Image (cartoon, rainbow, N blue to C red):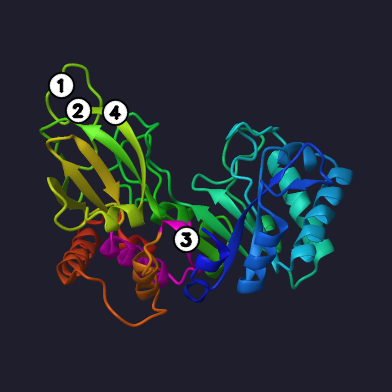
């Protein structure tokens, strides 16, 4: 997305993705982006942070000298281009992620680095991090239950509550589920679960942002679809599994990704030929399926976006972080649904019936004690 095309007024903050680490803590890469484009973006935004990617984080923060050098490097770049903050995108400290180096001491070294960065930056520079939905892994391989040290030096954390299920999973499912009561046993991550975990680990709710993806994964599933009955009594076709010799809802392959704008502009949410539309009420995920071609797309729609944003607002959390703005339509439909749900704008989403079903479902969940909006009452 070109700087001129970003709808700046639709967002309260923008992270410029991405500067990347190099083997030298005194040098970071602009990832092929020109100085003029970066300056253009900052000039237009003036309320943005830089985001740094994480291949060499582990080595950079492993010593006091490395931590200080790297922190100073980031601050120099921030000041050079006029950014007002730094967002750290070290997604998997203590474990292998996207070919990143790692060490059992990553979590403690990461905290020391953030403390160094805050000390050098001062209180007025906005510091944040993107973190895994599972949390931050400690030296024993278990996720830390106390993140109060991180909370003390950061202005906020974005929980990456997306990519919960994808084309690597071996089954279909939600990208960013609100709740996980109907999810397979080994895939119990959700927006509500992550919000609760990070709050309990020491982050103030108002300093927690929930990540929402502006893209969807696509699969191929043969007919007929398998129907699953969830603990709350609702029924869903969201979960389809690969099974040898099965003739019922067999997940048979992948078909890449779609941006939300591609689905909307092509008519998938309307009368696009052959696509059946349904909603999974537990995860708040729309399901688009074409029986003839087998294409199966779990995705967000305006109603699910509104409902998830309303959940965040109702729990008095900090807000929504969209990954990323380039996935929205030209008229900002994706963004608009989130803003209405967060109470930033007046208005309504397009489907009144969906809102009524959502309200009914929340009441059913509360009555049955399942995993839903009621579990976030603070």
**Element at label 1:** loop
Circle 4 sits on which residue?
253
Q: Is residue 317 magenta?
A: yes
**Element at label 3:** helix
Distance of label 2 from label 3 (alpha carbons):
34 Å
Circle 1 sits on which residue?
246
Query: Residue 229: x percent and y percent?
Result: 16, 43
Q: Are marks 2 and 4 in contact (CB under 8 Å)?
A: no
Which segment is the magenta one?
A: 301-327
Circle 3 sits on which residue?
325
Foreground mark, 1 or 4, reads 4
State the residue at coordinates (19%, 61%): 361
Disc on the earlier residue, 1 or 3: 1
Horizontal placement of 107 versus 14: left or right? Answer: right
Query: Residue 278: x percent and y percent?
Result: 16, 51
Q: Are marks 4 and 3 in contact (CB under 8 Å)?
A: no
Distance of label 4 from label 3 (alpha carbons):
28 Å
Question: Which of the labelled discs sits on residue 250, or is there none?
Answer: 2
Characterize the local packing of mark 4: few (<14), some (14-19) or many (20 or more) Cα atoms within 10 angstroms. Answer: some
Residue 41 position (above or below residue 57)? below
Residue 293 visible somewhere in the drawing: yes
Query: What is the quadrant of residue 308 in the picture?
Result: bottom left
Characterize the local packing of mark 1: few (<14), some (14-19) or many (20 or more) Cα atoms within 10 angstroms. Answer: few
State the residue at coordinates (71%, 62%): 153
Looking at this view, is 142 or 252 the one in front? 252
Please state, as top left, top right, bottom left or bottom right, where the C terminus lies in the image.
bottom left
């Amino acid at each position: 997305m070109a700087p001129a095309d970003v709808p700046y007024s639709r967002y309260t903050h923008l992270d410029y993705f991405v500067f990347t680490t190099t083997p030298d803590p005194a040098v970071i890469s602009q990832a092929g982006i020109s100085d003029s484009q970066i300056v253009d973006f900052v000039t237009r935004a003036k309320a943005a942070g830089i985001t740094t990617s994480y291949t060499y984080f582990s080595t950079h923060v492993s010593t006091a000298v490395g931590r200080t050098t790297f922190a100073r490097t980031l601050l120099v770049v921030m000041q050079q281009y006029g950014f007002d903050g730094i967002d750290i995108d070290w997604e998997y400290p203590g474990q292998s992620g996207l070919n990143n180096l790692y060490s059992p001491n990553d979590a403690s070294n990461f905290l020391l680095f953030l403390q160094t960065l805050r000390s050098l930056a001062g209180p007025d520079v906005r510091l944040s991090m993107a973190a895994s939905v599972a949390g931050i892994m400690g030296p024993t391989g278990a996720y830390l239950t106390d993140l109060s040290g991180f909370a003390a030096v950061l202005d906020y954390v974005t929980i990456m509550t997306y990519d919960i299920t994808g084309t690597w999973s071996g089954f279909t499912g939600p990208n960013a589920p609100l709740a996980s009561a109907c999810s397979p046993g080994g895939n119990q991550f959700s927006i509500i679960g992550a919000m609760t975990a990070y709050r309990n680990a020491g982050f103030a709710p108002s300093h927690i942002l929930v990540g929402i993806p502006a893209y969807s994964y696509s699969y191929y599933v043969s007919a007929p679809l398998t129907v699953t009955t969830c603990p709350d009594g609702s029924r869903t076709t969201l979960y389809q599994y690969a099974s040898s010799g099965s003739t019922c809802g067999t997940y048979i392959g992948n078909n890449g990704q779609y941006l939300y704008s591609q689905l909307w502009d092509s008519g998938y949410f309307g009368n696009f030929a052959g696509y059946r539309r349904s909603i999974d009420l537990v995860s708040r995920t729309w399901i688009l399926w074409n029986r003839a071609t087998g294409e199966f797309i779990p995705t967000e729609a305006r109603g699910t976006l509104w409902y998830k944003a309303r959940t965040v607002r109702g729990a008095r959390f900090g807000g929504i972080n969209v990954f990323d703005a380039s996935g929205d339509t030209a008229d900002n439909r994706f963004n608009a649904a989130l803003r209405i749900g967060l109470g930033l704008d007046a208005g309504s989403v397009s489907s009144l019936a969906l809102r009524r079903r959502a309200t009914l479902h929340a009441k059913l969940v509360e009555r049955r004690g399942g995993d839903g909006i009621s579990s976030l009452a603070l």
